[in-house]
Each structure stands twice: as structure tokens, then as C-alpha cells.
Image (spheres, grey):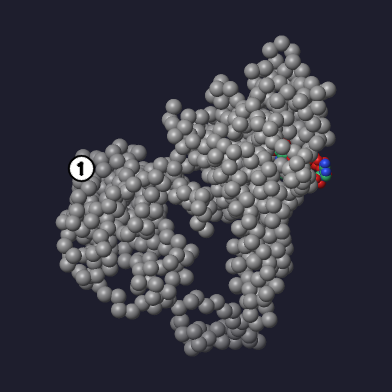
Amino acid sequence: MKHYWFTEEHEMLRRVVREFSEQEIRPKIRELDAKEEFDRSILDKMGEMGFLGVCIPVRYGGAGMDYLALGIVSEMLEWGDTAFRETISVHVALNSLAIFQWGTEEQKEKWLIPQARGEKIACYALTEPNAGSDVRGIQTRAVRQGDVYILNGEKMWITLADVADHFLVFAKTDPEAGHRGISAFLVERGAPGLKTGTIHGKLGARASNTGWIVFEDTPVPAENMLGEEGEGFKIAMSALDNGRYTVAAGAVGVIRASLEESVAYAKQRTAFGQPIANFQLVQQKIALMQQRLDVATQLVYHAGWLKNQGIRNTRETSVAKWYATEAAFASANDAIQIHGAYGYSNEYNVERYLRNAKGAVIYEGTSEIHTLLQAQYALGYRKDKPLRRELPAYDPEEWTREA
Amino acid sequence: MKFTVLLKQTPDTAELPKITPEQALAGNQGVTKVVNPWDEYAVEEGIRLKERFGGETVAMSMGPDEVDEALKSALAMGCDRAVRLWDESFEGSDVWGTALVLAKGVEKDGGADVILTGKMSVDGNSGAVAHGVACKLGVSLLTQVAKIVDISDGMITVERLLDEGRETVRAPLPAVVSVVKEINEPRYPTFIRIRKASRAKIPVLTAADLGLSPDQVGAAAAKVKWTELVKPPAKKREVVIIEGETPEEKARKLLDYLMNVEKVI
Ligand SMILES: Cc1cc2nc3c(=O)[nH]c(=O)nc-3n(C[C@H](O)[C@H](O)[C@H](O)COP(=O)(O)OP(=O)(O)OC[C@H]3O[C@@H](n4cnc5c(N)ncnc54)[C@H](O)[C@@H]3O)c2cc1C
């Protein structure tokens, strides 16, 4: 499993996160999943260890690791369960990295540092009851009144809605201006008129918290606007370049777990007087999982490498997310087939992998949206223009500087 | 105070059954290696002692290059520095030879107030290295330690876990302390420590550095020779249903089965 882009630090990190998933998540997950319970004690341990600021520079409260480390953490957490990878996706990738990329120094002090230290939990609120893929169709309004913006509207399907202290919220400041009329705001729990709740009855990611947020005349200080007025759409999309990367890396974890468990089961289960691993139709499924694991790994960590170099990676991340999440769904499905009736029951993990994997082909751009994106790039209809602020390239000295 | 933890790199327990006797004898097991699980408790205790009493915690191990990985794990958990003891002449050391090298390592590193080890290794299982080190250093030996109560006035007070209960004993420092898993819950490394530990350059002390000649160590000096190594028989699981008309008949048949077929009573 050695890869040319992984250093000793990455290998150590992978071992530790695997052990963490093995000891802290896997023993509890069947019950948490069945009860739809988000286990705060796991989140607290993650905060203490540095998960919640893995690739944030030390001077902003992070661990000072690189973007490949963010991928490894996502992969090995989702090898345990999707729930805590989703935490990393929203807290680190979609929220903290957006503040790191677009925020002012004052905003980084106030919002990013406590988040990276794990003292405050953050989420990303874009989707609404009537707008998912169609981001410019969001209806939440932000109207300036003196030093504050007044927010009204509703967000839906928001990971950690009921857990988070900090919300990155997208709202329309100019409803006539299409995607240029969207702005981004940093909002704190406790703000007047802000309410949250949890959505129950999800197919998968049941040990994660997913919910809704309502704003009723919620005043947000103007200084809490992230980026400039009208820049919200670009901020939302650039954040998704990081969020999708963690979703894709997590999907690699699902493929890895599906493969490992299928191999173990196929060697141990006998039928017609021999281990089912001897049957070529079972072997084919295992071979396909290995192939998907290798391909997804290459796509994902290539995107991570591009991030380290500071090279724009919207297309590469999209293709990695699209491929890896579909490959995870297919692998979990094959893993159930190999387990036969046992795979159909929650006595084994593989049915949970399938339920979890289905979510990832929907959120952070449905597979259809990624299909369209890739076609547009290939046809030359879409080109990425430089952003006013790009995600900084990883610089080990800069990231590990103490102050 | 100075706390030195002696640790060993061993195969991952999950992978132990995969190792063949030939591989074990050759010392090349071809499996994932980790810090000996028992020694993790010693590392944790070494770090806690530093946190309680101040000073430094040093991780030390005898072994080839690959052992750096285990020492780095100890650094990632919170040890201040690590020292590796290696020389080709150390190859094939038995418990006594290993204890000699470790004792010399502790001395060369400037001694220590408390020397910690796990109660045994999951591969060798001798549980005798701590005894050997204490003997070679001529210091107190405390085994089966489940709690370090206090260190003061040149004395260490510990609770030992016995079959019948616990006993509290005091001994003069320096002391070799071998710990049981009841003593603590080893911590996870933090990411910042992983980042730093992965870059650590671990110094190596050779036989010459330790003032040891080839005839004192390694296979040459070993008092124990491995003549044969066999795998324990695989555990077999079988369900036998004892049939019978009456409970008395079933009991009689069961007794007969246990005495004459399984020969367990
Ligand atoms: C578990 C979970 C967690 C989530 N967490 C978050 C979060 O933290 N923050 C957040 O903001 N959102 C979150 N979401 C919401 C998620 O991002 C949206 O569900 C997703 O963007 C799709 O939007 P939608 O559900 O409204 O579907 P729709 O956009 O209504 O799509 C419905 C169907 O139509 C298809 N479709 C739509 N447009 C087109 C088109 N142009 N061409 C072809 N097909 C099209 C879609 O592919 C899909 O198949 C989460 C969702 C889930 C399930």
C-alpha cells in the first residue's frame, strides 16, 4: 500500500486513524446507527487529537499537516463509519478551509482558531427545502440594515445542524442578480431567531447528525460576511472543491472496508465443499473492488497533491468524487452479494456500507451534476477562472510556524 | 526525574497466527509490526509520571532500523526522546543478552530513576527481561505493577496486582517497574506529535558505544538455544449433542464422553 506521494508522517497518521476507527467507532457503530445517535464523545476525542484542524496551520490552532493528510483522515474515518467522515467534511473542509481561504485575519482569529482546536463545531448551510443542485435557486434572504444583515429563510439537509456552534450560511443579498446575488455569512448559535432541528429516518449516515436551520429576522453583524457581497456563490463552490475531496477520500475507505471484509468472508465461508473464494464469479467481484480501490485512490490523492501544490483542481476533484462514490456504492453492493443472506443483515457491516454509500452519490453534487460538469469541461463549455482568493498551497514552514 | 521506557516492537497480535515457526526462528516474520501491546502501558505510564513529577521520559529499544517506527509511536504519544540500541552482533540475543544490552543502554544514557517495561512481549512471552535489566543494573525490581502511588525521598511506592488482591510495596530508586494493563489507558497520539515524531532522527548506540564485545551478546552469548519451534494446535470447535432417554442416562453418557473420549476429567 505504499504510494509515492505518502510520507512517513502520512503512514503514521493512517495507522493511528485506523486504530481510532477500530477502537472508538466500530465497536459502537451498529447501535449508534440503529438508534440514529450522534456520539458526541467521539467528536470530543477527535477534537483533542487534532482531527478538527488537521490541515490548518498551527498558528490558526491546527495540526499543520497537509491536504493529503485531510484525505487520509477522511478515508480511514469512513473505513469506520460515514458519520465521522461527514464531520470532517463539513467542519474542516467546507467551513474551516473556506474561512482560511476567504476570511480576514480578524475572522480567522474569531472563527477559525476555536474550530481548528475543536472548541467550536462548524457546519455548512447551503441546501434549502426548495434548492439543492440548483444553488442559485436558494431563497434565504439577507437584508442590510445599518451594521447588520437581517436573515430570513430555511436550510435543510445540513450535516451537524443540531450540533454545530458555527454556521456558514449562504443567502441572497440581491435576489435579482442570480448567482452574483448570493453572499456568505458566519453565524453563531444563540443568534436571535436561529433555530435548528434534526431530521430522522435517513437511509444511511444514521450516526451522523443531519438537520434543518431556520432564520427568523436573525441579525448578523456586517463584519461576519465572509468575502465580499455577491461573492457567496464562488465561496460556496470553492468550499465544495474541498468538501468533495473529503467525500471522495471517504468513499475510498468504504471500498477498502468492503474489500477487506469480502476477502475475509470469502475465504471462510464454504459452499459446495469449498471456500466460496474459489469460485470465479466471487473472484470477479473481489477483483473489481480491488480495481475500484486502486483507481479511486489514484484520483483522490492526485487531487490532494494538486491542492498541496496550489493548483486549481475543481475538475479533478469532481471526477474523483463522482467516480469514488459510485465505486463505493458498487463495492458495498458486491460485498453484500458475497456475504449472501448474512450480508443482508446488520450482523455484518456491509449492509451499512451500502446505505451509507448511497448518500455520497447525492450530496456535494449528485452524480448527474458531476456528469454534466465533466462533459462541460471536455466540450470546452466550462473553464475555471482564477478566484480573487485561492486556497493557499501547502507550505510546511508556513503551516508549522508557531506564531 | 528521569523515566526510561524499554519497549519492544512485536507483530500485531491480529497477525501472530499467520507467522510460521520457520519465520519466527529466522526473525523475519513478514507481518505488520507495532509497539508490543503490553509496552504501550509502560509508555503511557512513563508519560504520566513525567506529567506528575516533572522531568523527562525516554523511549529505548534494542533492534534494527525498522524499530524506529515503534520508537516514533512512543514519541508521538508523548515521550521526549528516543534511543535505539543496535549492532549486528546483537542479533540472536536471548533474554539475558537483551537485558545486558538494555542495561548498558540505560547506563550510557545517563541512568534513570524509574525504568518501565510491559509485563511481557506478545511474541517472546518470557516476561523476564525486566528481571534481567534490574539484575544487571543492580537496582530494585517491581513487577505486576498496577499503580504507581508515589515517588518521593528516593523511594517509589507501588501497588502490585496479585492473584489474591493487591499489595502495596516501597522500594528505593532507581527501580525497574514492569506494569500490567490495569495501570492505565494508553492515550492516542495527537496529530501535532505525529507530525513531529515522524521527522525525528533517532540516535543509535552500537556495541562499541555500550562497551560490549561480541562474545558478550547475540547468538554467541545466548544461554538459551531454540532447538525446535512448533505452532500451538489450532483451536477446534465442535458441538456434540448427547442424546438419551432420561436425564440420568444423558448425564452418564456425558460423563463417559468427557472421561473416555475427550479425556478432560
Ligand atoms: C446525508 C446528507 C447530508 C447533507 N449535508 C449537507 C450539508 O451539510 N450542507 C448542505 O448545504 N447540504 C447538505 N446536503 C444536501 C445535498 O447537498 C443535496 O441533497 C444535494 O445537493 C442534492 O440536492 P437535492 O436533494 O435538492 O436534489 P435535487 O437538486 O432536487 O435533485 C433531484 C434529482 O434531480 C437531478 N438533477 C437536478 N438537476 C439536474 C440537472 N441539471 N441535470 C440532471 N439532473 C438533475 C439530481 O441529480 C437528482 O437526481 C446533504 C444531503 C444528505 C442526503
- Give the amino acid at mark 1: Gly
Place of residue A8 in the rendered image (x, y in percent of width and height, measured from the top left): 44, 50
- Residue at screen point 38% across, 71% down: B24
Place of residue B21 in the rendered image (x, y in percent of width and height, measured from the top left): 39, 75
Chain at tag 1: B
Q: Does the image show residue B161?
A: no
- Residue at screen point 71% across, 68% down: A340
Q: Considering depth in this image, is B45 or B21 the residue closer to the camera?
A: B21
Q: Considering depth in this image, is A11 or B96 the residue closer to the camera?
A: A11
| The image quarter in which residue A137 lies | top right
Residue A180 lies, with reference to residue B42, above or below; the image says above
Disc 1: which residue: B154
- Residue at screen point 56% across, 20% down: A106
- Quick one: which residue is furthest to the top in this view? A146
Ligand 1's quadrant: top right
Place of residue B209 in the rendered image (x, y in percent of width and height, measured from the top left): 19, 53
- Residue at screen point 71% across, 49% down: A322
